[in-house]
Image (spheres, coloured by chain):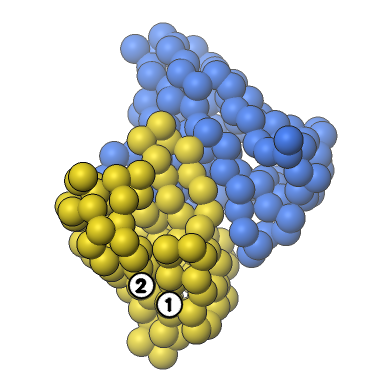
Chain colours: A yellow, B blue
Amino acid sequence: KNEVEQSPQNLTAQEGEFITINCSYSVGISALHWLQQHPGGGIVSLFMLSSGKKKHGRLIATINIQEKHSSLHITASHPRDSAVYICAVHGGATNKLIFGTGTLLAVQP
Amino acid sequence: DGGITQSPKYLFRKEGQNVTLSCEQNLNHDAMYWYRQDPGQGLRLIYYSQIVNDFQKGDIAEGYSVSREKKESFPLTVTSAQKNPTAFYLCASSIMTQETQYFGPGTRLLVL
């Protein structure tokens, strides 16, 4: 079993829909990251959080340390949000980044 | 503009040849990382460096080598000992380990 699990693996939404991507982890962590990878391959860091909630534009990230769970929400989704969203945690025995396998999001116009 | 550059974007090599992937950053970051990405798998750490002239093996270091002679540069050599080198390679840097990592655009290596 992977130490970081994401769901769903694939998600198709219509433009304007509210989207939620989930991340569960099984190790102790110091921080959790949400990353975005576009089709060209480049990765952008969206959030780093260790508690509570962060918001940036239409993106909201929450984390529940007790339940070892984080969610990434996208409000009023747009086709340009289509990308792979990756959850990663700083944790485990080495405290290095451990990555989930990503959620492929496609937003259709 | 500050950032991380990787070159080339695509690289083709014959089996048995060593190949070196470039990674340069002008963010003045101390820590640098090399990751490998394969379809259906999360990124896996190959090597990382916390400071100049020092580096540590990651989870999948076998068949790879690195150097960190300058703060700005962290080249990765894929040697002929790497059994399955075809993959997407990403370089990243951060102010310190455990801080937000900034990623380069990646190099797609295809070994024929």
Place of residue B93 in the rendered image (x, y in percent of width and height, measured from the top left): 66, 47
Numbered label attached to residue B42: none
The residue under label 1 is which amino acid type? Thr
Query: Secondary structure beneath disc 1?
Result: strand
The chain under label 1 reads A
Place of residue A86 in the rendered image (x, y in percent of width and height, measured from the top left): 39, 56
Could you tell me which residue is drawn at 74 percent across and 55 percent down? B95
Q: Quadrant of the N terminus of chain B?
A: top right
Could you tell me which residue is drawn at 51 percent across and 74 percent down? A54
Query: Secondary structure beneath disc 2?
Result: strand
Q: Quadrant of residue B47?
A: top right
The chain under label 2 reads A
Could you tell me which residue is drawn at 43 percent across and 64 percent down? A59
- Against B68, is A46 above or below? below
Q: Quadrant of residue A65?
A: bottom left
| Viewer-nearest residue: B56 or B25 | B25
Numbered label attached to residue A71: 2
Q: Earlier in the sequence, mark 1 or mark 2?
A: 1
The residue under label 2 is which amino acid type? Ser
